[in-house]
Image (tube, rainbow, N blue to C red):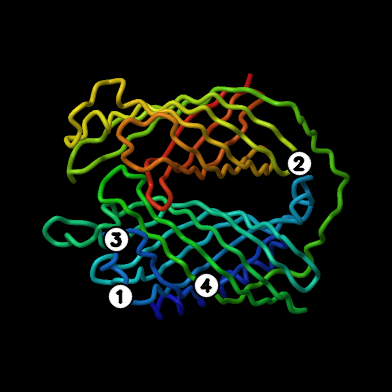
């Protein structure tokens, strides 16, 4: 891992030279040191050592071209490349990945900045479950996995464009239950690093012209997905979800959504441990509420739901969602997200919504 850190230092020097020709570009390098969370009893044997890694980030510093730049205190958008141990080299090996992110300041002055960031990407875990070679890996069964990173960061800027940063990151890796076992990898990693940003980025102030429609809006949302269930090595099972949605926007940044969810999960129908799997018994119904964060045409959706009908209750009464919606036009939107039961992924959602 030390070699990786030295390699990132080399990249930082090279990219700093490139950055001098682009006054919107910033570069960061940081060390990440933390641990893996054993969020299930089946993972209690996995944590053995610290999760130590490095991160290289290249980002674009907005300067006010869009009204949303000023609304969010001139956020940064970019990509981070991470490489880290995962707390157990024998069972999990290491993890590498790329994350596309947005970094949004809470407090921003000339010298100091405190921000929150959210990112999604793809990660590669070097050691996965194998019934013969690696049977103790209850966390991950596929090399390629989706990554979600949530973090906060403090930056202190010096006069020459350099700055140092302190951060705190929660990183989740999962295949969305497309293959089991898939309890997922959850890392908590504080970070410390340095960065470089050109001084001649002028932040422009523009009059806000964002149109705000505060009417209640109604719509339909269709989701499709698939997942594997135990026993390991079985087939993929189709999942469908139809939701009636009610949306209300309160400010230029935020709003709420309420869903009436209907789920049809063939994985329940095919579970060998059920003795009463008629078609009606694989239907689940729930009520879901979410907070919406609006960033131009993109929405970040975070929420909590409860099943009101669930005959077998395989995962408890509560489900959660973290996802994104992109407004294609006034009526259509594209949806991708992760449905889970707390720290355990249920499946990845892909869908289309229609607003009346």
Report the residue that reaches farthest toward the right. 207
Q: Nearer the viewer, mark 2 or mark 3?
A: 3
Helix, strand or loop status at disc 4: strand
Q: Earlier in the sequence, mark 2 or mark 4?
A: 4
Q: Earlier in the sequence, mark 1 or mark 2?
A: 1
Q: Quadrant of the N terminus?
A: bottom left
Q: Residues within 10 Å of mark 3 (few under 14, many from 20)?
A: few
Q: CA distance from mark 3 to mark 4?
A: 25 Å
Q: Position of residue 127 (x, y in %)?
A: 26, 62
Q: CA distance from mark 3 to mark 1?
A: 15 Å
In the rendered image, which residue does mark 2 sit on?
Answer: 252
Between 168 and 133, the one lying in front of the other is: 168
Q: Nearer the viewer, mark 3 or mark 4?
A: 3
Question: In the figure, 131 relative to 257: above or below?
Answer: below
Question: In the figure, 253 relative to 329: above or below?
Answer: below
In the rendered image, which residue does mark 4 sit on?
Answer: 190
Labelled disc at residue 41: 3
Q: CA distance from mark 2 to mark 4?
A: 32 Å
């Amino acid at each position: 891992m030390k070699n990786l850190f030295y390699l990132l230092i080399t990249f930082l020097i090279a990219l700093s030279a490139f950055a001098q020709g682009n006054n919107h570009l910033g570069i960061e390098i940081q060390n990440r040191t933390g641990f893996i969370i054993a969020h299930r009893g089946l993972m209690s044997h996995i944590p053995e050592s610290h999760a130590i890694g490095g991160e290289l980030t290249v980002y674009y510093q907005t300067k006010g071209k869009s009204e949303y730049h000023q609304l969010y205190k001139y956020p940064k958008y970019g990509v981070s490349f991470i490489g880290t141990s995962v707390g157990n080299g024998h069972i999990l090996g290491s993890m590498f990945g790329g994350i596309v992110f947005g970094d949004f300041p809470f407090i921003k002055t000339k010298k100091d900045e405190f921000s929150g960031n959210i990112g999604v990407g793809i990660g590669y875990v070097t050691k996965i479950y194998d019934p013969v070679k690696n049977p103790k890996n209850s966390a991950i069964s596929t090399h390629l996995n989706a990554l979600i990173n949530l973090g906060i960061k403090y930056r202190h800027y010096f006069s020459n464009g350099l700055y140092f940063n302190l951060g705190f990151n929660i990183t989740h890796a999962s295949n969305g239950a497309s293959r089991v076992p898939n309890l997922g990898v959850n890392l908590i990693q504080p970070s410390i690093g340095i960065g470089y940003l050109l001084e001649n980025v002028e932040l422009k102030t523009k009059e806000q012209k964002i149109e705000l429609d505060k009417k209640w809006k109604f719509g339909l949302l269709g989701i499709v997905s698939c997942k594997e269930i135990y026993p390991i090595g079985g087939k993929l099972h189709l999942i469908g979800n139809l939701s009636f949605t009610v949306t209300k926007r309160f400010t230029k940044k935020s709003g709420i959504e309420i869903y009436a969810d209907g789920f049809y999960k063939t994985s329940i129908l095919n579970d060998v441990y059920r003795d009463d799997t008629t078609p009606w018994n694989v239907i689940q119904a729930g009520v879901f509420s979410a907070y919406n964060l609006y960033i131009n045409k993109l929405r970040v959706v975070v929420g909590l739901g409860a099943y009101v009908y669930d005959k077998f209750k395989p995962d408890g009464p509560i489900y959660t969602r973290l996802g994104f919606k992109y407004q294609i036009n006034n009526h259509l939107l594209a949806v991708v997200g992760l449905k889970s039961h707390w720290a355990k992924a249920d499946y990845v959602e892909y869908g289309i919504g229609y607003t009346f």
